[in-house]
Image (cartoon, grey):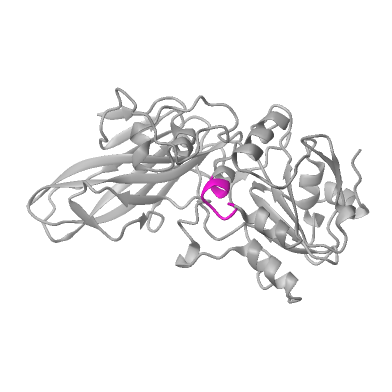
Amino acid sequence: MTRRLPRGWGFGGALACGGAVALLACPPSSGGPTHASARPASVAPAPLAGVPPAGPRAEGDAFEVWLEAPGGIRAGDAAIARVVVKARGSYHVNREYPMSFRPAPAATATFQGEKVALGEGADRTPCADPPGEACTVSAPLRFTAREAGEARVAGTVAFSVCNPERCLIEKVPLSATVAAR
Amino acid sequence: MRTLTVLGLLALASPALAAAMGQPAPGFTLKDLDGNVHRLADHKGKIVVLEWFNPGCPFVVNSHTKGSLVDTAAREIKDGVVWLAVNSAAPGKQGYGAEANRGAAKAWSLPNPILLDESGVVGKAYGATNTPHLFVIGKDGKLAYKGAIDNSPDGERASPRGGVLVEYVKAAIDDLAAGRPVRTAETKAYGCGVKYAN
C-alpha cells in the first residue's frame, strides 16, 4: 500500500520537526516560499492524526519512493534491496544531493552503518526534460537478515528533487518485510 | 542605483568573464531590506564574504539551522570580516521580497544585511549559480574564493565528501587573515538554482 504524505509535507515539515523520526508526527507546513517562519527545530511537534505507519512505499506531489525487497534470501548472507526514487511532474532527482538511508531502531535487518550512502551503483533513468537529469534513481541497499524468519528492512530515505522553481529535500520513512530462510 | 565596474559589465555579456579568481571583484551598489545602500567599494581593505541567499531554498535553510552557516557570519564579523547576503530572486520567484527575507533574518538571528538584487545583475556578474553560493574577497579587493560553504552537499554537515568535513569559506578566510594564498580557492557550489528572471 502506498502511503500518501500530506501536501506541503516535504522540507517544511522537516524544518519544523528537526528530525527524520519526528516527520511522522509533524503537521504539514502551510507552504509558501519561506520555511524560515516555521517553528524552531527544538519545539516538540504535535502528533499528526491519521498518518499510517511507514510502509514500503510513499509519495508526495513531487516524488514517489519505495523499497524493493528481494525474495529468497538466506539469514546471515548479504542481500540487496533497492531504494527507488521517482520524480514526478516537472521535478527531477537532484544528483548533487547525497541520497542516504538511515536504519530505523525497529529494523531487524543489519546494514553497513548508521547511515548508508545510496549513490554508488545506482541506476539512473534520464528525464525526457530536462535533458541530462535523472527522473528515476534506483539504488542498491545492502543488508543482512540476522536470523531466519521475517526481517524488517526499515529506515529513512533522504533525497532531493528539484524543478526550475524550487528544490525539495525529503526524508521519508519506509519499511518492508523480507522472508529469510 | 546600481554601479558596476567595467569587469561587471563585461560579465553580463560573457558569463565566462564573471568574477574571475585573482581579479578585482565586480563592484556593486545594492539596497538591503531597510533600504540602506551598500557598496562593495565601502569595504576596501577588508575581507568581504558574499553569500548568495534565498530563504525558500531548503539548502539555505539547512545551512542556517544545522549546517555550516549557523552563527558563522556572527563569528566572522567579530573578527572584522564584512558579511553580506545577496538575494538575486526575481519578482514572483521563490524567496523574492523583503518580507520573506526579513522572516529568515529574524528566525536565524542573522547579524548581516541581506541585499536585494532582483534584477540579477550582481548575481550574474559574480557567476552565482546556487543558493548558497559563497564568494570571498580579499583585502586587496580581489576574488580569493568562490564555491560551496563546505563539502557536505546536504547542507547539514552530515554527508561530507570523503568522510571529513571541510569548511571551505572558513578555511579561505583563515588563509587570507594569515597572509597565505587560499589553499582551496574554488569549489562547486551546491544548493538550489538562483531564481533569476530567466
| x and y, in percent, of residue B159 in the image | 46, 57
Q: Quadrant of the N terminus of chain A?
A: top left
Measured along the vertical axis of the image, is residue A31 above or below residue B72? Answer: above
Task: Specify whether residue A40 is painted magenta.
Answer: no
Q: Determine whether, in the image, residue B51 is placed left or right of residue A103.
A: right
Measured along the vertical axis of the image, is residue A11 above or below residue A48? Answer: below
Residue drawn where x is 30% and y is 29% of the image: A3
Q: Which of the 4 image quarters holds residue A165?
A: top right
Task: Specify whether residue B63 is painted magenta.
Answer: yes
Viewer can see residue A132: no
Residue drawn where x is 65% and y is 69% of the image: B184
Q: Determine whether, in the image, residue B106 is placed left or right of residue A110.
A: right
Q: Determine whether, in the image, residue A141 is placed left or right of residue B59.
A: left
| x and y, in percent, of residue A20 in the image | 37, 43
Over which residues does the magenta segment extend? Answer: B62-70
Viewer can see residue A142: yes
Depth order, front residue of B78/A41: B78
Q: Determine whether, in the image, residue A87 is placed left or right of residue B169.
A: left
Residue drawn where x is 88% and y is 60% of the image: B44
Depth order, front residue of B85/B121: B85
Q: Looking at the image, how many numbered discs can be counted on the residues?
A: 0
Depth order, front residue of A66/B113: B113
| x and y, in percent, of residue A141 in the image | 30, 53
Q: Which of the 4 image quarters holds residue B105?
A: top right
| x and y, in percent, of residue B175 in the image | 70, 72
